Image (cartoon, rainbow, N blue to C red):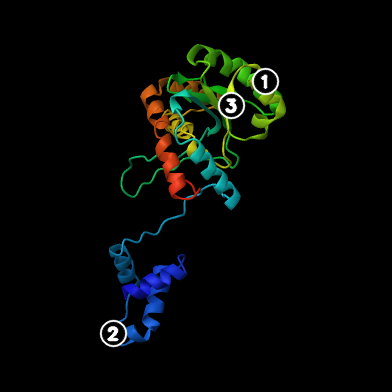
Amino acid sequence: MKRQIRSIVSKNPHIASKGIAAKLNQSPTIAEQELISDRTVRRTLKEMSYNNSIPLIVPFMTDVQKNKRVDWCRKNMRTNWNRVVFSDETSVELDRCKIRRWHPSGKRPTVGKTKHSRKIMFWSAISTNGKAPLHAISGTVNSDKYIELLETTLLPWFSEKCSATHIFQQDNAPAHVSKKTLNFLHSSDIQVLDWPPNSPDLNPIENVWAVLKEAIEKRCPRNMQDLDRIAKEEWAKIPQQKIRDAIRSMPRRIEQVLEKEGAKCDY
C-alpha cells in the first residue's frame, strides 16, 4: 500500500487523500481486503514523512540566470564580506498581518485589510560596521531620485562608517545600474560589487528586513505617519549582532547555491 501511495503522489502531488483512497480501493491488490479510508491514507502518509503544504514562492530563474549565479559564487568564494555594504529597498504594509497571535481555542483573530493596502517603500544599507539610516521613498525610483538618495543618505554614512576598501552592493534594478548612477558612484570613489540576477536569497539585508517588519507589526501602526515613525525607531533598535550574523552567513549561502547548481539557497 505504501508503495502504491508513493507512486500516486509522485505522479499527482495535488491529489487529495480521498482521491488516493479511491485509487487504492480500485487496485486489484487492495480490492479483496477491507476498503481503505482517506483517514488511513493521511495517517500512512504521515508515517512516510509526507506533508501537505502550500509551495513556497521563489523567484523564477532560467538556466542562464542559474549559471550566472554559479559563476558569481565561484568568483566570490574568498570575498571578505566584512568589507561589503549590502543595500536594498523593501515595502512595508500598514496592515501587515504575518506574525502569530495567541487566542482562545475556536476564536481565531481577524485583521481588517483593505483591497489596496497602503505601504511605504524604504531603503537602507548594512555592514558589519553598522547600518545606514532608514530612508522612506515616495513615488517611482528613477536614476535621478536614486542618486539623490545615495548622495543624501548613503555617502554621509559611508564616509563615517566605512573605508576606501569597502565595496557597495546593490541589485540590478534599472535605476541602480544605469550609466548615470554608475558614473555617480565611480565619481564618489565607491567600488560596486557585481551582483547576479534574481538573487535576493544572497543578500543578508533581506533577513534584517524580516526582523524590522515583525517589530513594526507588533506595534500596530494606525496610519502612515505612525508607520514611518515606528519603522525608523525599530530600525535603530535592531542589534548590530543580528546584522553581523546575517552577513557572516554569506559563505554558507554561496556553498548552498553551488550545491544546488544555481537554485535558491535556504536563506
Q: Quadrant of residue 187?
A: top right
Q: Secondary structure at mark 2?
A: loop
Badge 3 amino acid: Val
The front one of 244 and 41 is: 244
Mark 3 and 2 residues: CB-CB less than 8 Å, in contact?
Answer: no
Q: Which residue is mark 1?
A: 184
Q: Circle 2: is it few (<14), some (14-19), or many (20+) Cα within 10 Å?
A: few
Badge 1 amino acid: Phe
Q: CA distance from mark 2 to mark 1?
A: 76 Å
Q: Position of residue 168 (x, y in %)?
A: 55, 25
Q: Quadrant of the C terminus?
A: top left
Residue at 47% from the left image edge and 69% from the top image edge:
12
Q: CA distance from mark 3 to mark 1?
A: 11 Å
Q: Quadrant of the N terminus?
A: bottom left
Q: Position of residue 67 (x, y in %)?
A: 56, 48
Q: Which residue is mark 2?
A: 33
Mark 3 and mark 1 lie on one chain; the one further toward the N terminus is 1
Q: Secondary structure at mark 1?
A: helix
Mark 3 and mark 2 lie on one chain; the one further toward the N terminus is 2
- For residue 192, the mark is 3
Q: Is residue 266 visible?
A: no
Which of the two marks, 2 or 1, is nearer to us in this view? Answer: 1
Mark 2 and mark 1 lie on one chain; the one further toward the N terminus is 2
Q: Circle 3: is it few (<14), some (14-19), or many (20+) Cα within 10 Å?
A: some
Depicted 223 relative to depicted 53: above or below:
above
Is residue 72 toward the left or the right of residue 44 in the image? right
Q: CA distance from mark 3 to mark 2?
A: 68 Å
